[in-house]
Amino acid sequence: MNDTSYKIGMLGTGRMAINLSRLWAAKGHRIFIGSRDPQKAKTVAANVEGAVQGGSYRETAAFADVLALAIPWTAVTATLPNLGLLDGKILIDMTNPVEQTAVGMQLAIGHTTSFAEEIAQLTPGARVVKAYNSIYFDVLTDPQFGDQNASAFICGDDVTAKEVVAQLSQDIGFDPVDSGPLSNARLLEPLAVLWMQLAFSSHGTDIALKLLKR
Ligand SMILES: NC(=O)c1ccc[n+]([C@@H]2O[C@H](COP(=O)([O-])OP(=O)(O)OC[C@H]3O[C@@H](n4cnc5c(N)ncnc54)[C@H](OP(=O)(O)O)[C@@H]3O)[C@@H](O)[C@H]2O)c1
């Protein structure tokens, strides 16, 4: 593990939030879990081993150097203005802007933009990084498939922020893949739709994406 310990704010108390909080706390990062209901966050945090606190979304954002958006995409636009100033903070967007249509799961915002870019427009001072949006919450805790580790595709416009998220990914056993600028979220978001279609049709959820190299 890298010696650098980050102050990570987890927005949400669901499946991704709890698994990532546990994993990062176990690697020595300081975790603050946020909920719409601060009391719920405190209860959740008390059950996550490690140096973990809980509170409101605003308290979570104030604590964090790295904030992870682990809430439904439909809740993001209403939640961001409640976080206070995010200047300089790394904001990890793991959301998937999807909806069910007559032809199955599709991107709700189309292919000519991405939700990560929309988040960046709403949080001008934050360093937005798209990551983890095509990793199943259960796979977070077990990223090894045979002798291969699953990839964590990461895109963003701030090189240092991407390096931090790459390190955080490595800390929990993923092979980080720098996937270019934030506009490449236009590629990572539809990739996640394919991943979900494969997971929820024929292959099951114990799958992961991997960039093979030689
Ligand atoms: N599940 C996966 O395998 C997976 C994989 C890749 C990406 N993702 C993405 O990761 C995000 C979290 O997924 P999840 O499966 O962890 O979700 P989840 O288990 O349903 O939890 C989502 C959390 O978001 C908060 N929330 C719900 N509605 C909200 C609202 N209207 N406003 C503000 N906060 C709200 C809730 O926390 P409080 O009630 O405590 O506020 C809830 O615990 C989603 O965007 C999802 O698309 C999920």
Image (cartoon, rainbow, N blue to C red):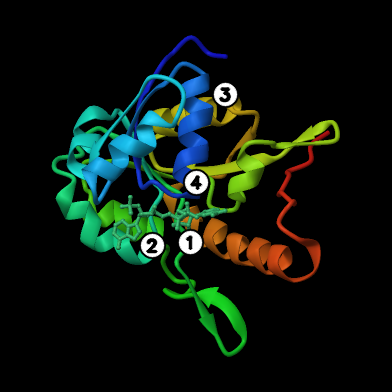
- Quadrant where the N terminus sits is top right
What residue lies at 63% left-to-right and 45% top-to-bottom?
Answer: 138
Decide which of tag 1 and tag 4 comes sooner along the chain: 4
What residue lies at 41% left-to-right and 16% top-to-bottom?
Answer: 5
Q: Disc 1 to disc 3, how far (Cα)?
A: 23 Å
Look at the numbered disc 1 and say if its residue's Cβ is closer than 8 Å to ligand 1: yes
- Ligand 1: give its quadrant: bottom left
Amino acid type of the residue tagged 2 in the rendering: Trp
Foreground tag (1 vs 4): 4
Look at the numbered disc 4 and say if its residue's Cβ is closer than 8 Å to ligand 1: yes
Q: Disc 4 to disc 3, how far (Cα)?
A: 16 Å
Residue placed under numbered mark 4 in the picture: 16
Residue placed under numbered mark 3 in the picture: 171
Amino acid type of the residue tagged 1 in the rendering: Asn
- Whether label 1 touches label 4, CB < 8 Å: no
Residue 96 has which mark? 1
What residue lies at 52% left-to-right and 38% top-to-bottom?
Answer: 19
Q: Disc 4 to disc 2, how far (Cα)?
A: 13 Å
Q: Position of residue 8 (x, y in %)?
A: 36, 29
Amino acid type of the residue tagged 4 in the rendering: Met
Residue 208 visible in this rendered orientation of the protein: yes
What residue lies at 16% left-to-right and 53% top-to-bottom?
Answer: 81
Decide which of tag 4 and tag 3 comes sooner along the chain: 4
Label 2: few (<14), some (14–19) or many (≥20) C-alpha neighbours in 10 Å: some
- Whether label 4 touches label 2, CB < 8 Å: no
Outermost bottom residue: 102
